[in-house]
């Protein structure tokens, strides 16, 4: 008997049973069919017209908790009164002479367990060519169907979460193609999810650095089955820049290999901006700390002013910075120190000190002044120094006490700029440091002057003049001694 059909492929148990049935019709003993059924490496059984067992394979018997010899002669329907109607109907079709295969069908057993079965049924005939029963081949697909249902359930749960997630959630295959992307992609890019489906991530228009990061990390997850995370930036629909943190995790297939990867991208723009503000603030505090230390050690006030203006302009990212000194007895202010101005102006240029200038307005109001656009400013006109350099924005604060100011410290930009309260705080702190250094220097000079005057008088006095410390030690004595 051939083990292959006319197409050249191995015969199925159902086809083999059909051959044996044909052999019977030619006079072959019925025992040959029974021997085939009993020795088959699949779940197959042979029944008479009343569905009594004639033969069963070992696998069939094991699935029903019996030895195959224990089944012979017993009625299948009586042994399993909970058999579904579709099972019985399929057998009736076989007994009516039909050979067919029935797709996956569910049998709810009496213990409420569910079994998914695929039936293949063929009638067998006796020597007189009458149908004497059926051969039933059963493929139990319960494990596969349960796995499919579990997978479907997980997919439904995944989709339900992903569809509602504010984060971008996508699934990629080994070819780096997006096989799924959630609606959040539209909020980030302004494009609907359908425009991304099936596309290679290298063709999505990502900036070069972001594209390289995506390709590198997705491939690494497929290769190592270990999750990866990274940060990248992407242009926003409004023309700005958005920052994202991506988490790429493996998704395993039935063979426990990485079939796809899940990628979650969270918008961390607010966090990135907060981090940048913190870093900027730390940088500002470090600059102020260095300026404070320099003020403690300074012997040259002019050098301190020049250094403080340069550091301040760098810290606040302004092109211009200056210190204007009040000229005693005059209404003008001297450009004592500055950065960014045309050569020859520092130390010589005089700025009007009245309310028509930003510096004069600052002195009159005794509080910080912010100018967003000098071209449309209505509180004052601005001095020629600012207009000649194309100044647009700026801010200024008083140096020293309001009743006896030393001058004005300010920074300016040639492009529109919105200064924050944090910027004002840095500017005022720097002005306070300079004011303290000036006051200390002035106090030291006054003390030195008084000492010089004291010595001049004491040296010429006919009386003995001395100075003692707390330990009763003479720290000075004049020549009259």
Image (spheres, rainbow, N blue to C red):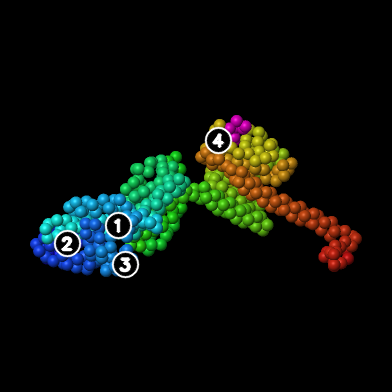
Q: Position of residue 179 (x, y in %)?
A: 34, 50
Query: Gap between marks 4 and 1, in whole Å?
Result: 94 Å
In front here: 22 or 399? 22
Q: Which mark is residue 16?
A: 2
Mark 1 — residue? 77
Which structural element holds mark 1?
helix
Residue extending farthest left: 26
Going from N to C along the chain, the mark reached first, 2 or 1, is: 2
Q: Position of residue 301 (x, y in %)?
A: 66, 52
Of badges 3 and 4, nearer the viewer stands 3
Q: Residues within 10 Å of mark 3 (few under 14, many from 20)?
A: few
Which structural element holds mark 3?
loop
In front here: 278 or 11? 11
Q: Residues within 10 Å of mark 1 (few under 14, many from 20)?
A: few
Task: Report the residue at 19% width, 51% height from top.
Answer: 96
Q: Residues within 10 Å of mark 4 (few under 14, many from 20)?
A: some
The stretch of residues the image draws in magenta is: 377-385
Task: Report the residue at 22% width, 67% height from top.
Answer: 38
Q: Which mark is residue 66?
A: 3
Going from N to C along the chain, the mark reached first, 4 or 1, is: 1
Mark 4 — residue? 373
Which structural element holds mark 4?
loop
Q: Quadrant of the C terminus?
A: bottom right
Going from N to C along the chain, the mark reached first, 3 or 4, is: 3
The reply to whether the magenta stretch includes residue 380 is: yes
Task: Report the residue at 70% width, 46% height from top.
Answer: 400
Q: Which mark is residue 327?
A: none
């Amino acid at each position: 008997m051939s083990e292959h059909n006319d197409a050249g492929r191995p015969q199925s148990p159902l086809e083999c049973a059909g051959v044996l049935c044909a052999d019977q019709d030619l006079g072959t003993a019925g025992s040959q069919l029974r021997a085939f059924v009993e020795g088959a490496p699949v779940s197959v059984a042979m029944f008479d017209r009343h569905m009594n067992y004639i033969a069963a394979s070992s696998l069939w018997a094991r699935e029903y908790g019996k030895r195959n010899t224990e089944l012979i002669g017993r009625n299948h329907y009586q042994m399993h009164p909970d058999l579904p109607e579709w099972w019985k109907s399929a057998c009736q079709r076989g007994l009516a002479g039909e050979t067919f295969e029935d797709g996956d069908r569910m049998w709810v057993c009496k213990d409420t367990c569910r079994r998914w079965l695929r039936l293949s049924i063929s009638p067998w005939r006796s020597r007189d060519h009458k149908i004497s029963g059926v051969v039933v081949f059963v493929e139990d697909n319960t494990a596969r169907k349960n796995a499919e249902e579990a997978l479907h359930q997980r997919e439904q749960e995944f989709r339900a979460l992903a569809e509602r997630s504010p984060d971008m959630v996508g699934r990629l295959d080994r070819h780096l193609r997006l096989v799924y992307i959630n609606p959040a992609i539209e909020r980030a890019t302004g494009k609907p999810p359908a425009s991304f489906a099936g596309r290679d991530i290298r063709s999505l228009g990502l900036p070069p650095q972001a594209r390289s990061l995506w390709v590198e990390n997705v491939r690494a997850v497929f290769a190592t089955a270990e999750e990866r995370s990274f940060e990248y930036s992407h242009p926003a629909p409004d023309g700005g820049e958005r920052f994202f943190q991506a988490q790429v995790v493996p998704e395993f297939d039935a063979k426990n290999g990485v079939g796809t990867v899940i990628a979650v991208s969270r918008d961390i723009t607010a966090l990135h901006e907060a981090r940048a503000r913190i870093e900027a603030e730390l940088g500002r505090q470090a600059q102020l700390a260095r300026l404070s230390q320099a003020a403690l050690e300074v012997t040259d006030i002019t050098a301190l002013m020049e250094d403080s203006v340069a550091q301040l302009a760098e810290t606040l990212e302004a092109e211009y910075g200056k210190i204007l000194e009040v000229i005693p007895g005059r209404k003008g202010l001297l450009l004592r120190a500055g950065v960014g101005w045309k050569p020859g102006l520092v130390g010589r240029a005089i700025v009007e000190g009245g309310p028509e200038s930003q510096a004069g307005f600052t002195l009159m109001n005794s509080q910080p002044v912010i100018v967003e656009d000098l071209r449309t400013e209505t509180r004052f006109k601005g001095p020629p120094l600012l207009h000649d350099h194309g100044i647009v924005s700026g801010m200024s604060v008083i140096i020293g006490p309001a009743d006896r100011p030393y001058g004005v410290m300010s920074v300016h930009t040639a492009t529109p700029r919105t200064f924050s309260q944090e910027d004002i705080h840095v500017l005022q702190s720097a002005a306070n440091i300079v004011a303290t250094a000036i006051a200390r220097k002035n106090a030291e000079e006054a003390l030195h002057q008084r000492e010089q005057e004291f010595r001049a008088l004491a040296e010429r006095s006919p009386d003995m003049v001395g100075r003692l410390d707390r330990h009763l030690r003479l720290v000075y004595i004049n020549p009259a001694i």
